[in-house]
Amino acid sequence: MKFNLFKISKSDKDSFCKEIIESSTPDLDFYFLVILSTLIVALGLVANNLILVIGGMLVAPLLSPILALALGVVIINIKVIMRSIKILLMAILTSSVISYLVGIFIEFDINHIDLISVMVPSYYTFIVAVTAGFAASFAWARPDSANAISGIAISVTLVPPITALGLALASSDMAIFNNAILVLLLNVFGIVLASTIIFLLMGFYKSKKKILAEVKQEEKVNNSGEGIIEKIINK
């Protein structure tokens, strides 16, 4: 017997699948938000301004490709999994390049950035990521919990470690660079693990046709000319 807590209607599942695929589509809107969020977070880190960092985290669209990845794992589909990984990697690369440029043109001392100094991989980091993953996947999938998304975006710490990668490269500090990579990996893995569990409990393995249909529709749009960045990269 399933708990009502994880029970959602087929129409809500379909809406969620559509929203996740659309919000993680690698179009100009997606990359523009990645760039903006990175700029805000990078400037916030350099200025030791927590408010700016939080603001940048709210703008970032990086949660959607990670949830799409979890959906791919749930339906056991390599195409959806690879699509999500590719989008996530390109977003990370874009964000890292932007933060690197910020680090090149703005004078700062990375060792005096408080939020980066505490960015150390640990079991705690992973536990927080798993908890945030549970909250993010549950809230986003349930229409009545949508108001919680903004708060969850803050707890899902994806942009700060990515931004730290670029700033560390600009400062030639490989110790911080390595820590940032490990923190990022722990966050991504924790969110994917937690989201996969939630999606299984909600029965999203039954939504395979809908997910594949949305991915196919996305491919048609990209082929028609909207997937500009992806086309440039592939060339």
Image (cartoon, rainbow, N blue to C red):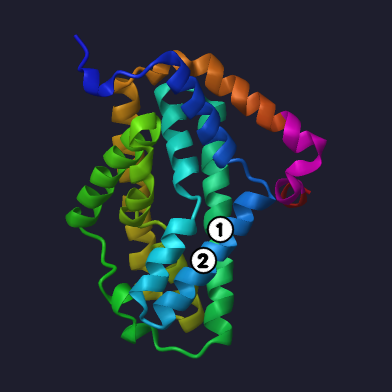
Work out whether 44 lies above or below 91.
Answer: below
Confirm whether the magenta stretch covers residue 230.
yes
Q: Which amino acid does label 1 sit on?
A: Val
Rendering quarter of residue 115? bottom left
Residue 92 placed where, x, y %?
A: 52, 57
Q: Is mark 1 on a helix, strand or loop?
A: helix
Q: Which class describes the residues within 10 Å of circle 2: few (<14), some (14-19), or many (20+)?
A: many
**Farthest residue toward the top?**
1
Comparing 220 with 3, the one in front is 3
Image position of 116 (left or right of 209): left
Residue 36 placed where, x, y %?
A: 56, 64
Q: Is mark 2 on a helix, strand or loop?
A: helix
Residue 105 placed where, x, y %?
A: 58, 86
Work out whether 60 lies above or below 9.
Answer: below
Residue 131 visible somewhere in the drawing? yes
Rendering quarter of residue 23? top right
2 and 1 marks in contact (CB < 8 Å): yes
Q: Mark 2 points at which residue?
A: 38
Comparing 86 with 145, the one in front is 145
- The residue at the point 42 percent across, 76 percent down is 44
Residue numbers of the magenta segment: 220-231
Q: Name the residue under label 1.
A: 34
Q: Which class describes the residues within 10 Å of circle 1: few (<14), some (14-19), or many (20+)?
A: many
